[in-house]
Amino acid sequence: MSNLPFIRFLDRTTPPHIVTLVLITGMSALSMSIFLPSLAKMTAYFDTDYAIMQIALSGYLAATALLQIFIGPISDRYGRRIMIMGALTIFVIASIGALLAPTVQTFLFFRILQAAVATSLALSRAIVRDIVSQEEAASMMGYVTMGTALVPMFGPMIGGLLDEAFDWHAIFIFLAVAGFATLILVYLDLGETVAKGGVSFRDQVKAYPELLSSPRFWGYALCSAFSSGAFFALLGGASFVGSEIFGLSPMWSGIALGTPAIGYAVGNYLSGRYSVQVGINNMAIIGTTLTIVGLGASAALTIGGLTHPLSFFGFCIFLGLGNGIILPNVMAGSISVRPHLAGTASGLSGAIMIGGGAALSQLAGGILTVDTGTLPLQLLMLGTCVLSLLSVLFVVWRERKIA
């Protein structure tokens, strides 16, 4: 029998509705990916280099990584509701600022400020833990994750369609409107869920040395950083590849960017279905192997002279599939290394993962030219996936050594 609390939609005296949690979580993913098909056009509009414009993604990811560390303890002290409403307010203002920006410097400032919405992503999980028991939390988070997994698939498509119908400015009008609508929903539906103060940031920092001295924690954290880093590298270079190398329209670039999300959804299902029987380390090995096989085949075709959007973007479904298997398992592993430090481990591993993604996305934007073609990006993604496999194999070796 379910122990889920009674929920009434648009009633702050009851826990938030699942729709509210899905939307506040999805806003961060939407903001990250929706403008990517237009990145090359925006580069031309601001008369700058693609690598400079790439900071719109890497800077956003870097700011998100910092928020992963700080936002949990701050919300424990001051509450989830006020933090989410404040973050959405900043997001709406930043979206309008990016829309009206006269220079690339001003645009990038407001674009990075949009990362405030990542607060919602981090706190949605905390809210679930606030309102339901540990047994019900996994089930409820499954629904939240299932809903938000669709955003990376459809976000770039929406952005590409808006660009073709109007221009790239329409994307930021859409984000401002969507952010404001979500803010109103939060005001009406989300009451405060924190019953009392939690662990302070100072106490969490005191726990860092114990985690950072654990080889197994580093193995899991680096595995997640490298595997997700390959995906962030794809995000960093896909717009250039689609528009400049393959000549795709923003709409078709957006559709192409959605292919990894299909694999990710399948990988998440396989992870949920088989992780208990197979074990988290074995699942991570399977996932990393799948990414290496898929991206290796894509690179081999390019080296062999076959250059086509399907041979590039089509094989990226393996990247999504592998990550869908890898990430739930290694993230579970990272917080199980020191169970009494699960919250701190989650924040640190998340910061390492997204921070690494920021660096790789920026690198991807800097190494691509029309003359080099897609191969540098393919080899970069393949190399990080190999490092991901080596990281989880290190964990296996370490566990056997201390057994």
Image: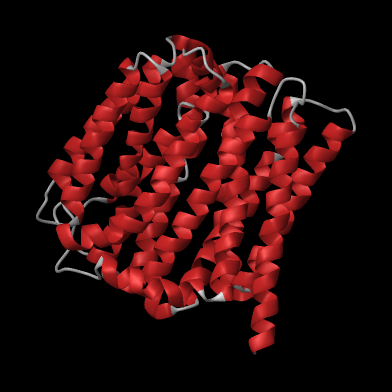
User: Dividing the picture into quarters, in which one does residue 273 lie?
Assistant: bottom right
Left or right of 60 in this view: 364? right
Left or right of 24 in this view: 284? right
Give the color scheme: rainbow, by chain, secondary structure or one colour.
Answer: secondary structure
Left or right of 90 in this view: 137? right
Residue 370, above or below 133: above
Residue 58 at x, y = what percent? Answer: 49, 38
Q: Going 11% across and 49% down the picture, which residue do you hit?
A: 11
Q: Going 55% across and 58% down the picture, which residue do you hit?
A: 327
**Which residue is farthest right?**
304
Residue 286, above or below 43: below
User: Dividing the picture into quarters, in which one does residue 97 lie?
Assistant: top left
Front-most of residues 134 and 237:
237
Residue 52 at x, y = what percent? Answer: 52, 26
Residue 183 at x, y = what percent? Answer: 20, 37
Left or right of 344 in this view: 17? left
Residue 378 at x, y = what percent? Answer: 73, 38
**In the rendered view of the protein, which quadrant contains the C terminus?**
bottom right
**In the rendered view of the protein, which quadrant contains the N terminus?**
bottom left
| Residue 179 can be seen, yes or no | yes
Q: Going 54% across and 46% down the picture, which residue do you hit?
A: 357
